Image (cartoon, rainbow, N blue to C red):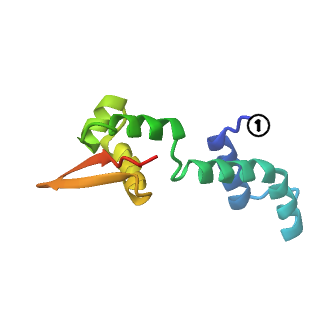
Amino acid sequence: MDKVNVSEDLLKVKDLIRKPSRQLKGEGQLKAQLQRLGHKVDNIEKIVAEKKGRFCPERTREIMFLLENKEMSAEDIGRILKMSRNRANEYLRKLEKDLLLRTRLEGRKKYYRAIKLKP
């Protein structure tokens, strides 16, 4: 897959929409000019869609490994795995939703532990 420079492509598309080329006349020619950039715009949309809400399987395994025999908070996980508490919390909420974690509230802090599955 070709590397896409998102900022340059977005600026080109915005520029085309605001100030279409003087050589082009009519809506059809504007569409043709936009279609020339179309493949790059499609790539940008695809990349954004993949990144949004995406969870790395390796990171998920690391979190499950940490919670296998120990109860931890999102802050603890974030510190150990060198990620933000918010990002760790996103992973933990997803795993909780998938019924892989058990939670316990202590005041305002939420602790997580992996559910042991019977073989």
**Quarter of the image with the N terminus in it:** top right
Residue 81 vs 73, above or below: the answer is above
Read off the residue under disc 1.
Answer: 1
Whole-percent x, y for residue 8 in the image: 66, 41
Residue depicted at x 83% and y 57%: 35
Q: Is residue 30 left or right of residue 109?
A: right
Depth order, front residue of 50/102:
102
Whole-percent x, y for residue 36 in the image: 85, 51
Q: Residue furthest bottom?
A: 27
Depth order, front residue of 38/57:
57
Q: Is residue 19 left or right of residue 105?
A: right
Whole-percent x, y for residue 6 in the image: 64, 43
Residue type beneath disc 1: Met
Depth order, front residue of 24/63:
63
Residue depicted at x 35% and y 51%: 101
The crowding category of the residue bearing disc 1, from other C-alpha atoms within 10 Å (few below 14, some 14 to 19, many at least 20), is: few
Residue depicted at x 41% and y 48%: 91
Q: Is residue 46 left or right of residue 39?
A: left
- Residue 95 visible in the current orientation: yes
Question: Dot 1 lies on which element?
Answer: loop
Residue depicted at x 26% and y 54%: 103
- Residue 22 visible in the current orientation: no
Q: Is residue 119 left or right of residue 75?
A: right
Residue 51 vs 68, above or below: the answer is below
